[in-house]
Image (cartoon, rainbow, N blue to C red):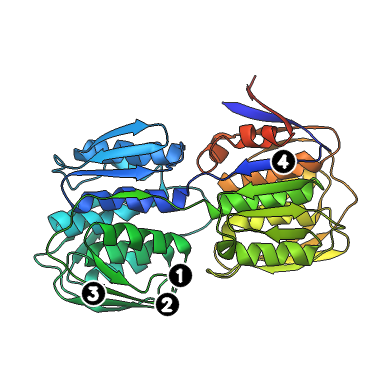
Amino acid sequence: MEKFIVKGEVQLTGNVRVSGAKNATLPIMAATLLCSGISVIHDVPNLRDIQVMKEILALLGAKIVREGKTLIVDTTNVCKAEIPEHLMREMRASVFLMGPLLGRFRKVRLSYPGGCAIGPRPINLHIKALEKIGTRVQESFGYIDAEAEQLKGAEIHFDFPSVGATENAIMAAVLANGITVIRNAAREPEICDLQTFLNKMGAKISGAGTDTIRIDGVNQLFPAEHSVMFDRIEAGTLLIAGAITHGDVIVENVIPECLFSVIDKLQEIGAQVISGTNYVRIKAGELRGVDVKTLPYPGFPTDLQAPILSLVTIAKGTSIITETIFENRFKHVDELTRMGAKIKVEGRTAIIRGVPKLTGAIVSAPDLRAGSALVLAALSAEGNSDIEHVYHIDRGYENFETKLYGLGAQIVRVKCD
């Protein structure tokens, strides 16, 4: 077990490069299973979730080599369509493997996926989509068995624009006979990145980034080479780090248009934000309370709800944050309260009364995004803070403390006593 020790009240300044997106890399890694051969993926972050996906692909028969930030994935000898339960339970994104394995082998067996305990994330939308294109699904004793004699194009309408279900449906449909149309599809940029990779493999997909996606099924796909997009959530977290420390930070390797909802909210809070071709600069002004409501893209991302909650704890006035995506995403509130924050939670809404400053404390990261939020709070707090259970943070942020240290933060990783 490891923890971060953070000395607060240090202004962050300088430039920092954002890593490739975990949420783009994982489905793209899964998509390599759709064909036989060697695919090359660049700008892959070195994270625990990526390692788990590598282990799953290896157990299915793939050979994977990492060279720096590049993954070389050889799926020539993949012959299995069953995913070990212990790996499924470690990572939610393992559910992405349903679509590719069905597309290639017409069958798959897996247990229910795990991940952060931030509330129920049922996979009924995944199953509904796969059934629409000709898959028979059986659920029993905690396992899902899916099989299809032939995948056929179909009309799929989602009750909710689920990112994972949209990506799974796309990957299953690329090798189906006929045309598949997905309506009320999720619009996240990571879906556009997956579309780009699949089209490089020979797929015929259009519409990613809108609520209607069309997939013209093809008979065969081929290996491809691709560089994954930047991590929007890491970029937003680093921008909030600049604001909460009253610093001057330039976040590089980004597409500012993909961060519009975050930039808009930071400007409303009082920060000065300047965007360039591939960077965003934040200079904090006087922070004031705001209302934030998490929504599917292009709304404010649920993955940045915890970090921005940390920010408004020291903003003047009252802020109201409403979480519409996951019901258990206020687990960091008790930890922030230890640091002097004034927060009241009512159902899916948090009411925050800003305080002049937070104070250092010993706190524990309950999940990935809450963990990053506690680090941000510690950066601004008076005195030292210990953030325990940082393995949660390691699941989604590459070299988090190193990047913050490069901006002037006084943060170190140590073994717990």
Q: Which mark is residue 14?
A: 4
- Residue that numbered label 3 is attached to: 132
Front residue of 52 and 239? 239
Mark positioned earlier in the residue sequence (2 or 3) = 3
Q: Give the SS element for disc 3.
A: helix
- Is there CB contact under 8 Å for labels 3 and 4? no
Q: Amino acid at mark 2?
A: Asp
Q: Amino acid at mark 1?
A: Arg
Label 3 neighbour load within 10 Å: few <14, some 14-19, many 20+: some
Q: Position of residue 348 (x, y in %)?
A: 64, 66
Q: Residue at x 26, y 56 (%)?
A: 98
Q: CA distance from mark 2 to mark 3?
A: 18 Å
Mark closer to the observer (2, 4)? 4
Q: Give the SS element for disc 1.
A: loop
Q: CA distance from mark 1 to mark 3?
A: 21 Å
Q: Is residue 408 above or below residue 42?
A: above
Q: Which mark is residue 187?
A: 1
Mark positioned earlier in the residue sequence (2 or 4) = 4
Mark positioned earlier in the residue sequence (1 or 3) = 3
- Residue that numbered label 2 is attached to: 211
Q: Position of residue 72 (x, y in %)?
A: 29, 38
